[in-house]
Amino acid sequence: MAQEVKNDIKKALQVNTIPLVAIMTAVTTVLTMLVKIPTPIRGYLNLSDTMIYFSAYAFGPWVGGIIGGLGPALSDLISGYPQWAIFTFVIDGLQAVLVGLLVKKFNPANIIIGSVIAGVWKVFGYFIAGGILSGFGPALGEIAGNSFQMAVGLIVGFALFTAVRQAYPPLVRLGNLSIKAGE
């Protein structure tokens, strides 16, 4: 198992992957900053989950994890939420890794179950981070908003992946869901 993971990471992180990671990290950063709904504990709801899910579906756990961690963390730094950046990097990055590891077949049930498990991790992670930064009372109030953000991200990320997958079939060679478009 450890050797398989090591080989997957080595395969995913090749020289030709660097431009992809850079572009997708920039897109994720911008989309995270595009829609910002402030929350009571000095955070904000955004579209980061959309790109986290899309990246994990399209590029697998390791590339998706880098994109999913870096994009939203850079958004925190640029947007004036630096206290959240390290938490965001770890929580969102692991969310993408979990999705990539759990979702191996392109079928709605598999995608929903794997994505919801990863989303529950994110909601829990932000509850802990919010508790550390602002106290657990206010962090408890963020659970509904973070759950909503995760659900919207799952729906839009899946729809985006499905559309891009059909428009650009070579996409499936990059990630886990290596089946032909239209199947």
Image (tube, rainbow, N blue to C red):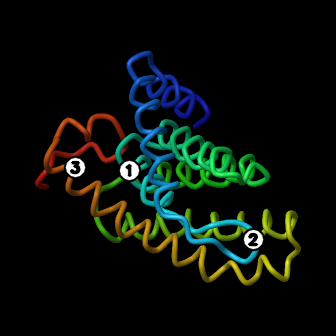
Q: Residue at x 16, y 41 (%)?
A: 169
Q: Quadrant of residue 78?
A: top right
Depth check: give the residue in front, 56 or 70: 70
Mark-to-mark CA distance, 2 and 1: 25 Å
Depth check: give the residue in front, 16 or 38: 38
SS for tag 3? helix
Residue 136, placed above or below residue 177? below
Give the mark nearer the N terminus: 2 vs 3.
2
Left or right: 119 as drawn, with respect to 166: right
Give the mark nearer the N terminus: 3 vs 1.
1
User: Which residue bears the numbered disc 2?
Assistant: 127
Q: Position of residue 80 (x, y in %)?
A: 70, 52
Q: Position of residue 123 (x, y in %)?
A: 65, 70
User: Which residue bears the numbered disc 1?
Assistant: 57
SS for tag 2? helix
Residue 61, placed above or below residue 87? above
Give the mark nearer the N terminus: 2 vs 1.
1
